[in-house]
Image: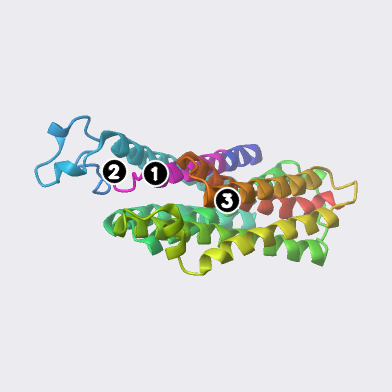
């Protein structure tokens, strides 16, 4: 059953990252209110396919079939993610309950997915309140972090003979923890900047992109500063991992460095050029990968340094 838990954790993690992608698609396409009610969509469990199916109490001008189905797909995938985590947690309770770390984090993942599902309803009822949207995002990042941890722990118990407990060096441990914290803050800052740009654009539809950026508070510069801080931190980690016997962990460090460089490049391009919305989507989604990869790297080092 150890293998079954590991597989369920991997499936839950993959589905959660897919949900973050679809959630980003909802954001960049403006589909957040594609279904103006919750949990139903225009009063129906299946979104309407034409305007005649809209209830009388809902404004017909709010109906856009593409936006409605994008938002509905997001909700449907959220249900699937929730069910996958329920199944994973049940496996942990029934078969691996003696492993307190796995049991606790499985229950934590179940709580986080439930809380974020409820928060999704509040996002709609609050008409995309930027603070609620940011909280929705940070809970998603915490969720994939916990699930990534469960993946590596599940792999460990399945391959018990291959692992031994070896403590990380303080420099590597502190650097990885700092990197994780800064990446989460960076993603939240980016979400806040995008939200404020959208709000300013609604109030000032004639503003150019330069005027929109000028209207932001000075914290927009903090996003850039933190981006380059991440670059220096990842370079420092590459220096710490210069030994040749760290196997996959060393490759993950270089992957983190490359991903951060790509994210900085995309971020700077978005400032100076009118890039397609999908570019913004992959910018955010790629950053969320780093959150889970750092967790996996941190835990994998406990046996690869042996």
**Neighbour class for label 1 at 10 Å: few (<14), some, many (≥20)?**
many
Q: Nearer the viewer, mark 2 or mark 3?
A: 3
Report x, y in % for residue 304.
83, 49
Tell me: 118 left or right of 169: left
The answer for how far apart the CA atoms under marks 2 and 1 are is 9 Å
Residue tagged 3 = 267
Tell me: 233 left or right of 264: right
Q: Quadrant of residue 24?
A: top left
Give the magenta part as a residue range. 11-33
| Residue placed furthest toward the left | 56
Residue tagged 1 = 26
The residue closer to the viewer here, 152 or 88, is 152
Tell me: 79 left or right of 50: right
Going from N to C along the chain, the mark reached first, 2 or 3, is 2
What secondary structure predominates along the stretch shown in magenta?
helix
- Under tag 3, what secondary structure? helix
Going from N to C along the chain, the mark reached first, 3 or 1, is 1
Q: In the rendering, which numbered label is found on residue 161?
A: none
Tell me: 155 left or right of 109: right
**Neighbour class for label 3 at 10 Å: few (<14), some, many (≥20)?**
some
Give yes or no for contact between labels 2 and 1 (Cβ–Cβ under 8 Å).
yes
């Amino acid at each position: 059953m150890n293998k079954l838990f590991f597989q369920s954790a991997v499936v839950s993690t993959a589905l959660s990252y897919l949900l973050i992608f679809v959630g980003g698609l909802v954001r960049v396409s403006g589909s957040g209110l594609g279904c103006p009610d919750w949990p139903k969509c225009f009063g129906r469990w299946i979104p309407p396919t034409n305007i005649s199916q809209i209830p009388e109490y809902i404004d017909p001008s709010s109906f856009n079939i593409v936006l409605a189905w994008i938002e509905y797909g997001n909700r449907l995938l959220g249900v699937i993610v929730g069910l996958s985590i329920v199944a994973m947690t049940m496996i942990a309770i029934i078969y691996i309950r003696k492993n307190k770390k796995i049991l606790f984090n499985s229950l934590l993942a179940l709580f986080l997915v439930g809380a974020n599902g409820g928060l999704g309803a509040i996002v709609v009822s609050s008409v995309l309140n930027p603070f609620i949207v940011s909280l929705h995002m940070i809970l998603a990042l915490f969720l994939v972090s916990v699930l990534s941890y469960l993946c590596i722990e599940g792999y460990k118990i399945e391959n018990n003979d291959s692992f031994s407990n070896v403590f990380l060096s303080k420099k590597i441990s502190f650097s990885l923890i700092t990197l994780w914290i800064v990446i989460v803050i960076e993603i939240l800052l980016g979400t806040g900047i995008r939200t404020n740009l959208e709000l300013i654009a609604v109030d000032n539809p004639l503003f150019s992109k330069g005027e929109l950026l000028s209207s932001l508070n000075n914290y927009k510069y903090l996003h850039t500063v933190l981006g380059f801080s991440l670059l220096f931190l990842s370079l420092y980690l590459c220096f710490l991992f210069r030994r040749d016997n760290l196997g996959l962990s060393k490759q993950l460090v270089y992957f983190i460095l490359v991903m951060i460089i790509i994210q900085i490049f995309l971020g700077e391009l978005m400032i100076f050029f009118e890039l397609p919305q999908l570019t913004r989507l992959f910018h955010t989604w790629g950053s969320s990968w780093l959150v889970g990869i750092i967790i996996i790297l941190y835990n994998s080092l406990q046996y690869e340094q042996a």
